[in-house]
Image (tube, rainbow, N blue to C red):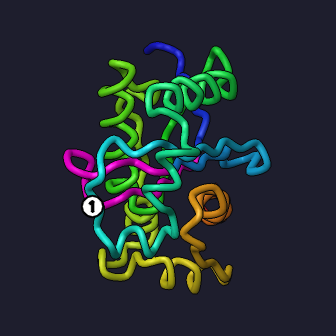
């Protein structure tokens, strides 16, 4: 059996102009290392078009017009993000994208990496915190909301809709879940010894 590769968990959150990348722009990317949440990345991107869902813009508080002026061109932003990911992933490790409802954030990140760089440095390594929690606790999907997870962990957690702050909040939540899972496993092993 080949040696196990280490994993570097990277919490990622995005804000977008709408619900899917085929029509709407990725507007901001926030990321941090799960185990070192002060190691961060943040960028705001120029929109690729003027398509926008008013609700999505209201939630994120970003302006397409302002980002057209001040945002980083998408290709340059993805080059910067890839460089940050690779710089924070040791040679004997692989980066793992971690998100709270990763399906949404992942589809934008994966699409933009492939569209602008032709590849994704995460490969197909995406971990959803909600699914991890469901598997760990055996609850129903409807019980994997942020409010349920925060109550289970006794850790108040709210999202600000700023990609970097939310990535850091997700990292804290995921670290707490990992710790709880390891404690549970240690308890099981000591009970069987």
**Relative depth, front residue between 80 and 107:** 80
Q: Quadrant of residue 75?
A: top left
**Relative depth, front residue between 59 and 185:** 59
**Relative depth, front residue between 169 and 92:** 169
Q: Residue at x 57, y 58 (%)?
A: 163
Q: Residue at x 40, y 75 (%)?
A: 144
Q: Is residue 59 left or right of residue 35?
A: left
Q: Is residue 42 left or right of residue 149?
A: right
Query: Seen from this angle, which residue lies furthest left?
Result: 22
Rendered view: 1 above or below 38: above
Task: Please tell me how crowded label 1 is: few (under 14), some (14-19), or many (20+) other residues with Cα within 10 Å.
Answer: some
Instruction: Look at the image and tell me in which quarter the N terminus lies.
Output: top left
Q: Is residue 73 visible?
A: yes
Residue 17: say if magenta.
yes
Where is residue 35 drawn, in percent x and y? Answer: 72, 47
Q: Which residue is mark 1?
A: 19
Magenta segment: 11-27
Residue 2: say if magenta.
no
Rendered view: 82 above or below 127: above
Rendered view: 61 above or below 171: below
Q: Residue at x 43, y 56 (%)?
A: 64
Q: Is residue 183 visible?
A: no
For the image, the number of numbered tags is 1
Q: Residue at x 34, y 48 (%)?
A: 25
Where is residue 173 drawn, in percent x and y? Answer: 62, 66
């Amino acid at each position: 059996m080949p040696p196990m590769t280490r994993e570097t968990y990277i919490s990622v959150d995005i804000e977008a102009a709408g619900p899917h990348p085929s029509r709407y722009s990725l507007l901001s990317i926030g990321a941090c290392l799960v185990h070192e949440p002060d190691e961060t990345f943040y960028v705001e991107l120029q929109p690729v078009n003027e398509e926008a869902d008013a609700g999505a813009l209201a939630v994120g508080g970003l302006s397409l017009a302002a980002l057209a002026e001040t945002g980083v061109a998408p290709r340059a932003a993805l080059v910067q993000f890839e460089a940050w990911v690779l710089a924070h992933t040791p040679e004997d490790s692989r980066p793992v994208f971690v998100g709270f409802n990763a399906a949404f954030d992942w589809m934008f990140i994966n699409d933009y990496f492939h569209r602008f760089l032709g590849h994704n440095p995460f490969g197909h390594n995406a971990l959803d915190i909600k699914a991890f929690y469901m598997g760990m606790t055996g609850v129903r999907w409807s019980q994997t909301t942020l409010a349920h997870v925060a109550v289970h962990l006794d850790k108040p957690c709210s999202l600000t809709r700023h990609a970097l702050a939310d990535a850091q909040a997700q990292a804290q939540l995921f670290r707490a879940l990992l710790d709880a899972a390891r404690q549970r496993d240690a308890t099981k092993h000591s009970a069987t010894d």
